[in-house]
Image (spheres, rainbow, N blue to C red):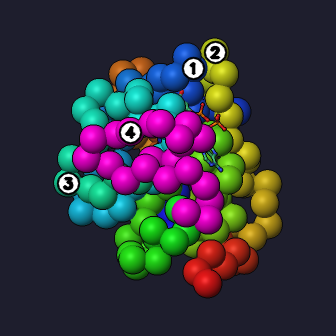
Amino acid sequence: MNFIVAVSKDFAIGYKNRLLFDLPSDLVYFKNQTMGKVVIMGERTYLSLPKKPLPGRINVVLSDNPLFQAEGAIVVHSLDELFKKLDNYQTEDIFVCGGASIYNLLMDYCDKAYITFVNATKPADTFIKDITKMPNWKIINESQTFQENGYGFKFVIFKNESVKEYKK
Ligand SMILES: NC(=O)c1ccc[n+]([C@@H]2O[C@H](COP(=O)([O-])OP(=O)(O)OC[C@H]3O[C@@H](n4cnc5c(N)ncnc54)[C@H](OP(=O)(O)O)[C@@H]3O)[C@@H](O)[C@H]2O)c1
């Protein structure tokens, strides 16, 4: 399993249930990495999508609300139920796509992290853990710095050297 996220300098990822930065190239990167794959997200992130479900991908939505329905997506209500569903897919084809509650819940089960580092800070209300401070996460690929809409950003891939098992 992998996770993919765009973070500010202080590991913020969202404000008022929206993304922090308008970076079309990052959306293209996200699409290229996840197309044809399984994308896992929390209810709030799913509801924030301009187009639901994300086309061309198997959408899995985690929600605490037993009545929540999402047309065209698989809805699960617990980690156990999620892991049972994920048994049907190759772990390298699974991408955790947010938000913070879902990243923080599933990060330890991920083999790789695809992180877009934006060299800026913004008012935010949603943060993830700083994996650069976790010794088990090692950088395996780092792009040059790109510029778009006044922001500098780079794409970095990390590998987890101590992945938690989720398959039974
Ligand atoms: N920068 C990025 O790359 C990126 C990517 C995605 C999202 N985001 C941003 O992240 C923000 C949303 O993040 P968020 O943390 O507020 O929401 P979220 O993770 O998208 O969704 C939270 C939902 O998941 C449910 N949930 C969490 N753990 C669960 C579990 N173990 N079992 C069942 N349900 C569970 C929660 O239920 P309860 O609350 O009832 O427990 C809640 O309904 C937005 O601002 C969005 O734009 C940023």
Of badges 1 and 3, the one in the foreground is 3
Q: What amino acid type should be assigned to the residue bearing mark 4?
A: Gln
The span from disc 2 to disc 1 (Cα, nearest Å) is: 7 Å
Question: Would residue 90 be seen by someone viewing this image from the given angle?
Answer: yes
Q: In terms of secondary structure, where does tag 4 sit?
A: loop
The span from disc 4 to disc 3 (Cα, nearest Å) is: 19 Å
Q: Which circle marks residue 123 in the picture?
A: 2
Of badges 2 and 4, the one in the foreground is 4
Of badges 4 and 3, the one in the foreground is 4
User: Residue 155 in the image: x percent, y percent?
Assistant: 46, 51
Q: Are marks 2 and 1 in contact (CB under 8 Å)?
A: yes
Q: What amino acid type should be assigned to the residue bearing mark 2?
A: Pro
Q: In terms of secondary structure, where does tag 2 sit?
A: loop
Q: In terms of secondary structure, where does tag 1 sit?
A: strand
Q: Which is nearer the eye, 46 or 139?
A: 46
Task: Look at 55% across and 16% down and name the residue there.
Answer: 16
Q: Is mark 1 within 8 Å of ligand 1?
A: yes
Q: What amino acid type should be assigned to the residue bearing mark 3?
A: Gly
User: Residue 41 in the image: x percent, y percent?
Assistant: 48, 46
Task: Look at 41% across and 29% down and name the residue there.
Answer: 47
Whichever of labels 4 and 3 marks the residue nearer the N terminus, that label is 3
Q: Which residues are magenta?
A: 61-81
The span from disc 1 to disc 3 (Cα, nearest Å) is: 27 Å
Q: Which circle marks residue 69 in the picture?
A: 4
Q: Which circle marks residue 56 in the picture?
A: 3
